[in-house]
Image (cartoon, rainbow, N blue to C red):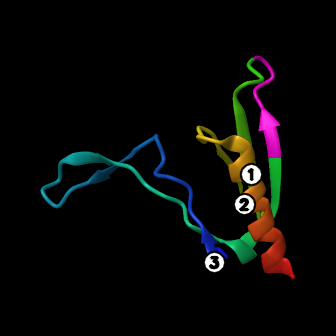
Amino acid sequence: MFRTWSPRTCDTSIKIAAPNGELVRVHYKVPTPLEKIKGLNESENMEKPSQKYMEIVTVDDFEFCFMGFLNYQKGFKYLQQAIISKRL
């Protein structure tokens, strides 16, 4: 089973300074150890119910929202199972 859950690379990039001083955009991932996940919630856009997202709450009360899954229901199910099995 999973040890960490890492979403796909974020669509939003951040700017950092390259060694030459130039600002460059980089994409990033947020790996999260399963034991640090306190909760997983299903949500949807109230105006566009087809736009579903997962909200992950960590033990230090940070909230992360993820969208754009190829198969939302399957992804939610497997992540939920991994979190539950880690608690056992």
The residue lying furthest to the right in this view is 88
What amino acid is labelled 2 in the image?
A: Leu
The residue that label 2 is drawn on is 79
Under tag 2, what secondary structure?
helix
Circles 2, 1 touching at the beta carbon (< 8 Å): yes
The front one of 78 and 49 is 78
- In the rendered image, the quadrant that contains the C terminus is bottom right
Extreme-left residue of the structure: 20
Residue 75 magenta-highlighted: no
The structure residue drawn at horizontal position 74% and vertical position 51%, both measured from the top left corner, is 76
Q: Position of residue 79 (x, y in %)?
A: 72, 60
Judged from the image, the secondary structure of the residue bearing numbered disc 3 is loop
Residue 54 locus on image (x, y percent): 73, 46
How far apart in space, not on screen, are marks 2 and 1 (Cα)? 5 Å
Q: Say the numbered circle drawn on residue 3.
A: 3
Q: Secondary structure at mark 1?
A: helix
Q: Residue at x 39, y 50 (%)?
A: 27
Quarter of the figure with residue 71 = top right
Q: Quadrant of residue 83?
A: bottom right
- Identify the disc placed on residue 76: 1
Q: Residue furthest bottom?
A: 88
The location of residue 85, given as percent across then percent down, is 81, 76
Residue 43 part of the magenta-drawn span: yes
Looking at numbered disc 1 in the image, what kind of residue is underneath it? Phe
- Real-space CA distance between mark 3 and mark 2, rounded to the nearest whole angstrom: 11 Å
Read off the magenta span.
42-47
Which one is earlier in the sequence, the residue at label 3 or at label 1?
3
Q: Earlier in the sequence, mark 3 or mark 2?
A: 3
**For this rendering, which residue is in front, 33 or 76?**
76
Residue nearer the viewer, 45 or 84: 84
In 3D space, how far apart are the residues under numbered discs 3 and 1 (Cα atoms)? 16 Å
